[in-house]
Structures are given as structure tokens and as C-alpha cells.
Amino acid sequence: MIKLTTDLRETVIAIAQDAAAAIMGVYATAFEIELKSDRSPVTAADRAANDVIERGLAQLTPDLPILSEESALVPWEVRQHWGAYWLVDPLDGTREFVKRNDEFSVNIALIYQGAPAFGVVLAPVTGVIWHAMRGELAYRREGMHDSVLRARAPAQPPLRVAASRSHRSPETESLLARMGDIEVIAQGSSLKFCRLAEGTLDVYPRLGPTAEWDTAAGQCVLHAAGGAVLSAATGKPFRYNRRETLLNGDFIALGDTRLPWRSWMPD
């Protein structure tokens, strides 16, 4: 296992900042939008950020594999033997990027034995960084200052519930109706996990597909802040690279893990 050090943390944060600069360079232009085979959008910003991150991580840890949304997927026959690897979403929230609503992020996570050991989420528009190492505290960085994050517990009504701007399904609407006294707050990308870690949101339910690179870095930050990202099927924290598919099942992210989330879920 790679040793989690201050130098490693700061180097990965610097790589994320370089990726954010590449993203903002494209954001300022009349960029073109392409569609992948799954009909999801991709832009030059996704590719530019991916190049920066893969190049930087390969120099930092040449022996560790990198799995990124924008790079060729690695066969399960290869991935199943990985003990540690980097899991990257170079531009999480491409739909938000295309809409120019500023709610997109850079996600970099180090996965060790199936769980996030280190995570960085960076908001390119503001430059704010959220980061955490497993077993330590979670932090929000603005400029040169780090502040400690704690999720809000106990959560008090009205619960502040994050809902995706681009992926809200009828099932999610039904779940929201069962939660009682709530305030629904639209928020894009993995920034939802960060706001839970800050205590400005309480719950983020997601009924529908996400990929493992969408959740890993945010899960690391939220868990270190006292919250959790739980599988709706098992009630346990997400594990990574444990199956051939890279798609997550339904989940709920909580700032206060004592909330009665099972009673909100569909039968």
C-alpha cells in the first residue's frame, strides 16, 4: 500500500488544480459537445483534465494503475487483481458544465482493498477543495486555509435534501414525498457529498445509475466528516472494484447516520 503522506496529499491536490485550470480554459470558450455511446455528453474539458490527471498520477506513483471515466476501461480479468489504484472522474457533472451553471468538479480517489483511502474533490469555478484521508479528519480548503468539516448531527427538520439537477427520477420524487418535513436543494455533481460533509445538507438519495468514479472521492470526504454513503440494498458503505460492472446501485448519503432512511426507500 502506498504511504499516505502530506507530500502525497499536496501533490494530488496540485494535480487536481492543474486539471481544474485546463477545464476552465475550455469553459471560457464556445466548446463543442459530443455524445458517448451511452448518450452522455463529453467535451474537450473532460479530455484535457483527464490527460493532466493521468500524466500527473503516473509520475507520482508509476506502479499504481489508474481507472478513469475518460480512459479505456480495464477488463475485469485485469482489475480484479488490483490491491490499490487511482479512481478518477476528471470532470464530474459534464451536464452541469454544458449548462454553464458552475456545479461541476474534479474527483480523484485512491482505492485500497476496495475502499477509498484518500479523496480530493475540487470545484474549478471557485477553486474550493475538499479532501480527506481514511482514519483522519475531512477538510475544506479555500486559498491556503484548511477548515475541519463535520456533518450536521443530529439533523433537525426540515431536513435539507440534495436532489440532482439532471437525474431526478419519479422514484426519487416518491422518496422525497415520504421524508416528511424537508427542504429540497438542487445541486450538481459530487459537490452534494461535500455539502453534506460541511453540514449544509443532510441527505442525498440517489435512485438510479452512477459509476464508481462518481462517488469514491466524495464518499471518502463524507465518511471522514462523520457521514456515510450507504448501499440501499445492503445498508453498508460502498465498496469498489468488487464486480465486473463499474456501475453503483441505488444509494443514500447521510450527514447523520441515525436518520431513519430505510423507511423512506421504495419497497
Image (spheres, rainbow, N blue to C red):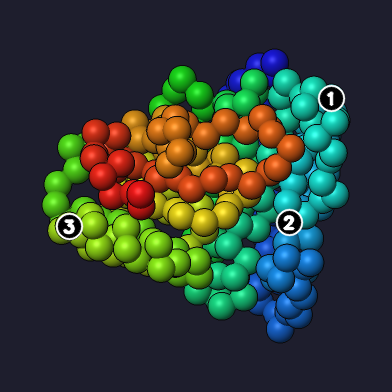
- Is 168 drawn above or below residue 224 in the view shown? below
Residue at image x 58%, y 45%?
248
User: Is there any visible trace of residue 112 in the rendered image?
Assistant: yes
Tell me the distance, in whole angstroms, between the alpha carbons under discs 1 and 2. Answer: 21 Å
In the rendered image, residue 163, in percent from the top left (x then y), is placed at: 39, 62
Label 2 sits on a secondary structure element that is helix
Q: At label 1, which amino acid type do we have?
A: Asp
Label 1 sits on a secondary structure element that is loop
Residue at image x 65%, y 73%?
27
Cβ atoms under marks 1 and 2 closer than 8 Å: no
Q: Which residue is mark 1?
A: 63
Tell me which corner region of the image, top left, top right, bottom left or bottom right, holds residue 82.
Answer: top right
Residue at image x 66%, y 17%?
3
Cβ atoms under marks 2 and 3 closer than 8 Å: no
Label 3 sits on a secondary structure element that is loop
In the rendered image, residue 158, in percent from the top left (x then y), is placed at: 16, 56
In the rendered image, residue 181, in percent from the top left (x then y), is placed at: 15, 58
Q: At label 2, which amino acid type do we have?
A: Ala
- Side of 200 where 218 appears, left or right: right
Task: Decide: few, some or many residues near mark 3? Use Cα within 10 Å; few <14, some 14-19, many ≥20.
Answer: few
Q: Nearer the viewer, mark 1 or mark 3?
A: 3
Considering every residue shown, the one lying at the far bottom of the view is 30
In the rendered image, residue 131, in percent from the top left (x then y), is placed at: 50, 38
- Side of 207 where 77 appears, left or right: right
Identify the image quadrant of the N terminus: top right
Of labels 1 and 2, earlier in sequence is 2
Using the image, tell me which numbered label, if any, was put on residue 180: 3
- Is 2 drawn above or below residue 101 in the view shown? above
